[in-house]
Each structure stands twice: as structure tokens, then as C-alpha cells.
Image (spheres, grey):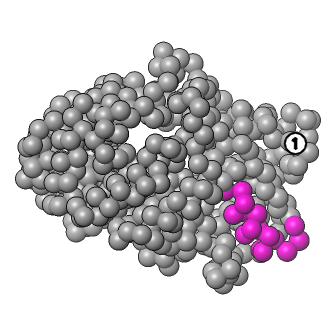
Amino acid sequence: MEIFIDVGGKPGIECGGFCEFCFYKKVDFKKLESLSIGCINCPPNQIGCDYCHNTVTRVKNDFKPLSQVLNDFKEKFNKHLRAGSLNYKELNVIIGAGADVFNYPHLYELVSTLKEYELRLHLGYTSGKPIDNDHMAENLISLGVDEISFSVFSTDPEKRRKWMNDNTPQKSLEGLKIFCENIDVNASVVVIPGVNDKEELFQTCVNMEEWGLKSFVLRRFANFKNQGLILNNKPIIEGVNPLSYEEFQELVREVAREFSFKVLGYPFCDPQNDFPFAISRVKNRDYLEKLPDIKSEATIITSKLAAPYLERIFGVIDEFNLVNIVSVDKDIADLITHEDLESVNLGNVKRNVIIPSGALVHDKKAEEILNKDGKVRLVVRGPYVLTNPYYRDEFYKEELLNFELNSFTALIDKINSF
């Protein structure tokens, strides 16, 4: 159980400068307001709502006043109390930010106040760049921080200096070591081919294993629009071709085999539990047998990374070939926009269509695009996610499989409702 509170902040600007590989580095902040996107929460006759507007423009927000952050926490905390769902032993308070949480000017006071509730406290993303002395890590630990998420990139100080624009890389790494030795640390690295992969990556892992790291997330560098750059059209780093998803998955598995800490990859890859879409694997075929029969025709539009898994699953359960899978050139389904839908060959689309729940397109716009050939199609959104979004670090395999079973049951119920 989690309570997430956001302290705001502008990426790059309040991170101690942009990292060379930062998603936001080449965003034209002045043009964000003009981006036309919609979402599942938009009113029927209005493209754009508070939710999708904030998804785009939150990167322009300053850090929030301490009073606002504390009020947000108290409101969420009291909501749990009223619902009778508060379990102190399981409750984890996560302090997140649009920028680097270590740069929040009221961080110490915020941590001190929240620890009065005797709850487990997790500090979200930090690059470590704000650590410029010997005391910051020790002070946060003494105040009661239980866990942090730390973007390391490399344990080579000069790599951090060049690629993260870290002015005090040695201090940052010393701080990371202190955190690892005393509290739970979830480190991450954005993998850039030829820069911090291969031997360099493994040396970073060796160092962090010696320090006592809890978990490690490899993030595939996204350099192109189809990989997720929805706020700009320019490559972040010219001339760099990121790993393919298959190459990236193999790298994640290799790291997982070699080291004792938990290893995950994003786009999602969990070698320990064979995820995502473990339900598609032959050894888990008994889960597919529990799914409802498919009784209606439909086309499912999804991302190019999810499509092969869905094709494998429906190839087993769809006895009469009532469902077909159509993929667009976007790696992540929740980042599909109206531009992606416009690329779909409508000759492959049946009269009933399911699009991703999180797709950044207004329902009315999706219907307009998918009916532009004059045929009348009914367009609905699928379940929120089909494989576990993995907000927690620890899951039982059975728990993950049941999540997928329930998600695909909901998807088939949508198909059968046409």
C-alpha cells in the first residue's frame, strides 16, 4: 500500500542541469500548451482535460510549497483512515518530484514531519547530483529515510561528470555507497550503447553489489519518437541507435544471472518471473485455459512491443479467429497518440475496435480516425493494463500470473460485450 506525494519541480532546470540523455533535454517548453492530446478522462466534447494537460505541462511547474505538500499527504492519509484500509506495517510513503527530489528546498523538514507518523518513507528519483558534501546522505538516514531510488548511470566519476553533468561525481558516488550500506537502495541506469554498457555496466554492478544494493533497473535509452518521445520530434543524442527491445531483454537477463540483487528492465522485463506476459508461455498454458470463450469479433490496436505477446495468446485461445491484433509503430501502448492511429491500415480493422486504456487520444478523435474510410466502427478502451505495471519491487509469480489472468478476462469481457 502506497501514498504518493509530488513535490513538483521542473526537470533539468531543478535537477542540477540536464543529463545528456534526459527525456526532456530538447523539449520546447514554450510549445507544450499547443500539443493536442486527449485521454480517457476527457469530457465527450472536449479534447484535453486536467489529467492529460498536467501530463504534458507538469514539467513546467515549480517546486510546491511545503504546506501544499503536507496538505496533500494529510488528505490521502485521512482517506485511508476513513476507508479503514490503513495498515501501518504495509504503508509506504513515496516522495516524488518532476525534478530531482534532493533539490527540494524543504526536503529535510518534509522528511522530519512525515516520520512523525512512523511510516516507511521512500524518496523517489534522485540523480545524486545535489550531493556535494559528506553529510547529506547521513543526515537523511538519521532523519528516518528508509529507501531511495538513485539514478547512477555509472560508478566511474568521469562518466558521470560528462554524461550527467555532475559537478561533484565523487561525492555523489560516496553518498550512494553510504545509502546502500544503511538503507534500501533501488538504483537505475539509462543504457546507452557504446557509453555505459558491456564491461562498463558490469563494473558498475560489481561496485553496487559490494556496497549492498537492493535492486537495479536497466532503462533502455529512448532516442526517437516511436520509443516514447511524445513531447518533441528531435533525437536527444544525434547518431545514437538504442538497443532493440530483444537486445535489451538479453542484457537485462545477463545482468540478472550474474548478480545477487533484484534486476528489472524498462520497457518492462523481469527475468526472475518471466514477465511481461508470462501467461503467454507454454509452461503457464493452464492459465489460458481458465479464460472465457471469445464470442464476438474485434480488432485490438496495441504497441509493437506488446503485439507479439497478444498474437501468441490469442493464437491459443481464439479458436475461430474472431480477434486480430494490429500494432502501431510505438513501443509503449500508453504513449499511442492520434498520429499513431492515423497510420493504421483500416483494411485490417474490424467493426469493433479496442484501443489501449491509457492511449493519449480523445475517444471522439479515435472514432473519427478509425471511421474515416466511411465504415462505422465502435471504438472502446481496454483494461487499464494487461501485465502488471510493477509499482512494487517484490511480487510472487503466482500474484503476477493472476493479475494477467484477471486482465485478459476483463479484455475478453470487453470483446464479448460488442
Relative image position of residue 399 (x, y in whole percent)? 48, 75
* Placement of 37 over or under 71, stated as above or below: above
Is 268 on the left or on the right of 190, as rendered? right
Residue ID at (57%, 36%): 240
Answer whether residue 256 is magenta in the image: no
> In which quadrant of the rendered image does the N terminus lie?
bottom left
Q: Nearer the viewer, residue 412 or 148?
A: 148
Query: Relative to residue 8, is residue 246 drawn left or right?
Result: right
Task: Write down the region rendered in magenta.
Answer: 306-321
The residue drawn where x is 20% and y is 54% is: 177
The tally of labels here is 1
Instruction: Tell me which secondary structure the magenta stretch mostly adopts.
Output: helix
Placement of 392 over or under 220, stated as above or below? below
Where residue 101 appears, as percent x and y from the top left, is 26, 39
The quarter of the picture where residue 299 lies is bottom right
Q: Secondary structure at mark 1?
A: helix
Res. 295 in view: yes
**Residue 239 falls in image quadrant:** top right
Which quadrant would residue 73 be assigned to in this image?
Answer: top left
Q: What residue is at 79 percent from the left and 37 percent from the top? A: 343
Label 1 neighbour load within 10 Å: few <14, some 14-19, many 20+: some
The residue tagged 1 is 346
Residue ranking furthest to the top: 30
Is residue 313 rendered magenta in the image? Answer: yes
Identify the image quadrant of the C terminus.
bottom right
From where the camera sits, is residue 400 visible?
A: no
- Taking the image as shown, residue 357 lies to the left or right of residue 11, namely right
User: What residue is shown at x 47% (from left), y 50% (from top)?
Assistant: 197
Instruction: Please provide percent x and percent y for residue 108.
Output: 12, 41
Q: Position of residue 69 (x, y in %)?
A: 24, 38
Q: Amino acid at mark 1?
A: Leu
Foreground residue, 240 or 386? 240
